[in-house]
Amino acid sequence: MTEESSTARAGSADVQQLPLDFSVFHQMHRPVYVRWAARYLSCRADAEEAVDDAFLALLRIWPKVLSFENPAAYAWSVLKNRVIDHARARGRRPSLMDAATFDTVALRTATDPIGELEEHLHLFRAIGELPPRQQDVVVLLHCEGYSTAEVASHLGITDAGVRSIDRYAKRRLREVLGTPERATDAPERATDTPRESSAPRSEGAAEAAERVEEEGKKSR
């Protein structure tokens, strides 16, 4: 489904009849919503349907949405509820633990696919156990490869908030995966410039979290 047909469906009318600010909001957020939803529903079509239903719900009360202190945060909560509804309607619950989740660059190019898969299983199981907000930030920031500013915009929080949540999430993941905390995880990063290291990575599950960020950037 194209974005144009999705917008038309959201309003059940011609695109030009939709509020301009709604159309802008839809164009800005829908691609990210679909990518996030697809990770949990494991089906692009289901993800698009859930996202379109979320926008329909937003459109019905759009003036009220704009009156909220944080429309983006409210829209994100509507999206998550729609994804849960769609998963339940199909007899399952939203989960990162699905075959589609592991269709990554690292797995397709791994010399040891079984070992790589085991590391991914540990990692995504750990991500799935994070608190909801930490999970959202990790998935968007590292699995999907969006910048700190982009994640903040879609979740309706500040850049500093994203960095703080990410820091606590990484700390939790390192505890679960058994990786020693790095000094760079302690303070908030002043910029969003990707860090590069010349040091070789180990092949243990403990380093899997760092590879997810790299894979997300390759997939964009």
Image: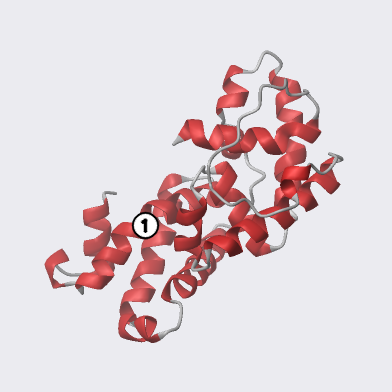
Residue 42: percent from the left, percent from the top?
53, 45
- The colouring scheme, among rainbow, by chain, secondary structure or one colour, is secondary structure
Image quadrant assignment for residue 71: bottom left
Asked if residue 104 is positioned above or below residue 142 in the image, the reply reads: above
Residue 88: percent from the left, percent from the top?
58, 63
Specify whether residue 137 is in view.
yes
In terms of secondary structure, where does tag 1 sit?
helix
Residue 73: percent from the left, percent from the top?
49, 72
Q: State the residue in front, 40 or 210.
A: 210
Q: State the residue in front, 111 or 146.
A: 146
Name the amino acid type tagged 1.
Arg
Residue 146: percent from the left, percent from the top?
49, 47
Q: For the point 41% across and 60% down, which residue is it?
A: 51
Specify whether residue 94 is in view.
no
Q: For the point 53% across and 47% down, which residue is it?
A: 192
Task: Farthest residue to the front: give it.
Answer: 190
Residue picked out by circle 1: 30
Task: Farthest residue to the top: give it.
Answer: 111
Q: State the residue in front, 40 or 218.
A: 218
Using residue 177 as the reference point, say whether residue 106 is left or right of it: left
Using residue 200 as the reference point, say whether residue 23 is left or right of it: left
Q: Quadrant of the C terminus?
A: top left
Q: For the point 73% across and 40% down, which residue is it?
A: 123
Asked if residue 216 is positioned above or below residue 152 in the image, the reply reads: above
Using residue 208 as the reference point, say whether residue 94 is left or right of it: left
